[in-house]
Image (cartoon, grey):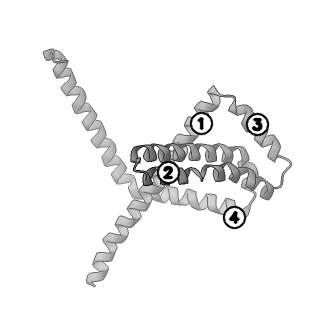
Amino acid sequence: MNQRRLTKPLRRALLLSLALLFLLEAWLWEFGGRWLAGLIAWLPLELTKRRIQAFVAPLSPWATLPVFLVPLVLIVPINFVVVWLFVKGRVTEGLVTIITQKLLGVAIVSFMFRACEEKLMQIALIRWAYRLMARWYRTARALTAPYRLWLRRWSRRSLWQIARRRSRWTQKGKV
């Protein structure tokens, strides 16, 4: 009985942690997609997307899978650079590299998925994984909703307090 009482909070904490990690990854996916959309508008990547779509159009869904995965595989060796930087004690450079790699990786995967989505969704395993991720995303959002609401209220309240203090300081001539 005592063990069961302890297991439930631990399980809840683990599920919440996993949900937060999942939402962070989803946020990076969305942010990376928006970031890349802005980059596409600035760079001629829309043409690249159309070329990729034209290239995969005659391919079978399974032949499209490597087109989607190759850019992802090309990013993986950056992990060795990150490990090397950490081993050399260059923690800041390692952190910057891993964050950049994560953002770039998510942006590239998002871009390639959008370019190959029609073909990839014809593969039952991909379609199943996509639906599973969508279900996990909904579950993670539902699980973290109260915490996100609290964080949103807290940040608004904090920003309001900062703005109020700043206006007092400017009125007193301190800023």
**In the rendered image, the vertical position of residue 53 relative to residue 138, given as above or below:** above
Q: Which mark is residue 128?
A: none
- In the rendered image, the quadrant that contains the C terminus is top left
| Camera-side residue of 125 and 152 | 125
Residue 71 x, y percent position in the rendering: 67, 48
Amino acid type, mark 1: Leu
Residue 35 x, y percent position in the rendering: 55, 36
| Camera-side residue of 84 and 107 | 84
Question: How many angstroms separate mark 3 from mark 2 (CA)?
Answer: 33 Å
State the residue position of label 4.
125
**Mark 2 touching mark 1, by CB under 8 A?**
no
Amino acid type, mark 4: Leu
Residue 146 x, y percent position in the rendering: 34, 53
Element carrying mark 2:
helix
Q: Which of marks 1 and 4 is nearer the N terminus?
A: 1
- In the rendered image, the quadrant that contains the N terminus is bottom left
| Camera-side residue of 152 and 70 | 70
Residue found at the far bottom of this picture: 1
Q: Is residue 142 in view?
A: no
Q: Which of marks 3 and 2 is in front?
A: 2
State the residue position of label 3.
50
State the residue position of label 2.
82
Q: Is residue 131 left or right of residue 156?
A: right
Q: Which mark is residue 36?
A: 1
**Mark 4 touching mark 3, by CB under 8 A?**
no
Q: Earlier in the sequence, mark 4 or mark 3?
A: 3
Q: Earlier in the sequence, mark 2 or mark 1?
A: 1
